[in-house]
Amino acid sequence: MKILILTEGTILTHKNWVELEREEVVRRVRDGVDPDLTYFTASVPIGNSAGKIRRWAGQGAEIVYLTSRRKQEEIAAIQAVLDAFRFPKGKLLFRTGSESYGEVASRERPDILIEDDCESIGGESEMTYPHLSPIVKPRVKSIVIKEFLGIDGLPDIISELLRY
């Protein structure tokens, strides 16, 4: 069982946003209120996302992460955050050139894809699942959560996650 999880907005947020209401975070992203937020080492887990993913990994799931970052130093910063907060080990994928999230995820062929709804940056057009290859898409269980809400509400048991 391979679970691919988007990082920013799905399991990670900026540390300055932890106490804010989700709607306020979405507004800030849309309005560009916090211009220093490209400093990705300031990311923290949303809720207990690290613990949730550890439970899935403990059931034998292979965990793969997909970041929105493209620059090597930003990708390294996201990896450092995942490591610092004890997220389970797993590949950290990223886009290169003109690749879409769907192209990257299609190559990986996950069983489950967990991502947020990308409300602050354009919605479905920015998501992964809608852009999977037509061959891969029918084989992937898509789970979409509200951006910046986190995955704490998802089932702990993988078989239940598949039915979610």
Image (cartoon, rainbow, N blue to C red):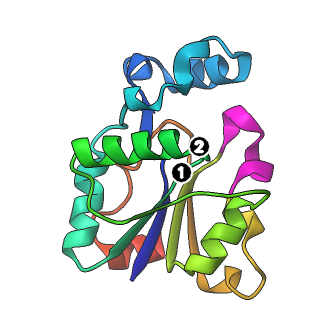
In this picture, is 162 found above or below 150?
A: below
Mark 1 nearby-residue class (10 Å; few <14, some 14–19, many ≥20): some
Query: Which residue bears the numbered disc 1?
Result: 67
In this picture, residue 78 sits left or right of residue 133: left
Which residue shows up at 56% across the image and 26% down it? 38
Task: Measuring from the top left, give residue 142's x and y in whole percent.
Answer: 58, 68
Which residue shows up at 60% across the image and 47% down it? 68
Q: Which mark is residue 136?
A: none
Tell me if residue 11 can be seen. Answer: no
Q: Nearer the viewer, mark 2 or mark 1?
A: 2
The picture quadrant where one finds residue 1 is bottom left
Which residue shows up at 49% across the image and 25% down it? 39
Query: Which residue bears the numbered disc 2?
Result: 71
Which residue shows up at 74% across the image and 88% down it? 135
The picture quadrant where one finds residue 141 is bottom right
For the residue pair 62 and 91, the one nearer the viewer reads as 91
In this picture, is 45 found above or below 28?
A: below
Distance from disc 2 to disc 1, alpha carbons, whole Å, reads 11 Å
Amino acid residing under circle 2: Lys
Query: Which stretch appears magenta?
Result: 118-127
The picture quadrant where one finds residue 88 is bottom left
In this picture, residue 50 sits left or right of residue 114: left
- Does residue 125 show up magenta in the picture? yes
Task: Measuring from the top left, give residue 78's x and y in whole percent.
Answer: 42, 43
Dominant SS type (magenta):
helix
Task: Measuring from the top left, give residue 59's x and y in whole percent.
Answer: 22, 77
Q: Are marks 2 and 1 in contact (CB under 8 Å)?
A: no
Task: Measuring from the top left, give residue 95's x and y in whole percent.
Answer: 65, 58
- Does residue 51 show up magenta in the picture? no
